[in-house]
Image (cartoon, helix red, strand yellow):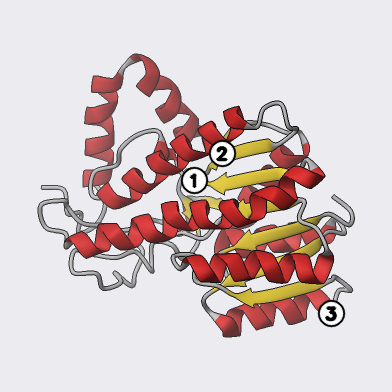
Amino acid sequence: MKNKVVVITGASSGIGKSLAEKFAEKGSKIVIAARRTEELENLKNDLENQGVEVLAVKTDVSKEPDCENLVAEAVKRFNRIDILINNAGISMRALFEDVHLDVIRRLMDVNFWGTVYCTKYALPHVLQTKGSIVGVSSIAGYKGLPGRTGYSASKFAMHGFLEVLRIENMKKGLHVLIACPGFTASNIRKSSLVADGSQQGESPRAEAKMMSSDEVATRILLAIHKKKHRLVLTTNGILTVTLNKFFPRLMDRMVYNHMAKEPDSPIR
């Protein structure tokens, strides 16, 4: 990965921040993008102090012009893009019958359309380098999670988009990876939207028992290096995806029961 130009969205915290740090350790040139400028600048300064070439670009991936600008700034600075990692994402926690439709639109705008916008503008450059397009998705893109209607829908949509992208460009040397962490210790649940669109604030899950964002980033980096098409993480994640192929009705009940055990679960 030495001297590869890597663009990472949602890089101000969690998996995105860990990805930036892991690629920096390998000698990559990093373009970090996020909405939160203070956290973004702090990460930029930390990496630059380690001798890493870094460009920070304030980006709201739900806005197409921001995504176009991100790619333009990356190419202007480094003259190429080798890897685009679509990591920016938000979640939700509410039953569909209760949730405001604007919440689902917001999730689709960030999780799905953010991936589409960034990929659209980066694709010509990544094709030139025969590089990688990565989508950081979720087990929720394989199995619908109750209380996460918009999240699962956006991740299923991301999967379909990236699979088609891979097939359309299979003779052009493009690598496309769909990375699916299980529950990961990050701030995504703290910023999850509830029924009225406000943030839930506190995670309903035991974060300390989850895979760390550093471990997820390490596994994603290795999957990119090996040109894998798919990466499914955590034992529970692998079991969920595998069992759902053969016993979907059983998995419906198991997923329901698992999600219903969350503190203050919306599942009734």
The disc placed on residue 103 is none
Tell which of 167 and 124 is nearer to you: 124
Asked if the residues shown at circle 1 and circle 2 are in contact, with their CB atoms under 8 angstroms apart, the answer is: yes
User: Label 1, label 2: how many angstroms apart (C-alpha)?
Assistant: 7 Å
Badge 2 element: strand
Badge 1 element: loop
The disc placed on residue 49 is 3
Q: Is residue 11 visible?
A: no
Q: Residue furthest top?
A: 246
Q: Which residue is mark 1?
A: 137
Q: Residue at x 69, y 76 (%)?
A: 56
Q: Which residue is mark 2?
A: 178
Q: Residue at x 65, y 49 (%)?
A: 123
In this rendering, position of residue 209 left or right of residue 43: left
Q: In the figure, 160 relative to 75: above or below? A: above
Q: Quadrant of residue 113?
A: bottom left
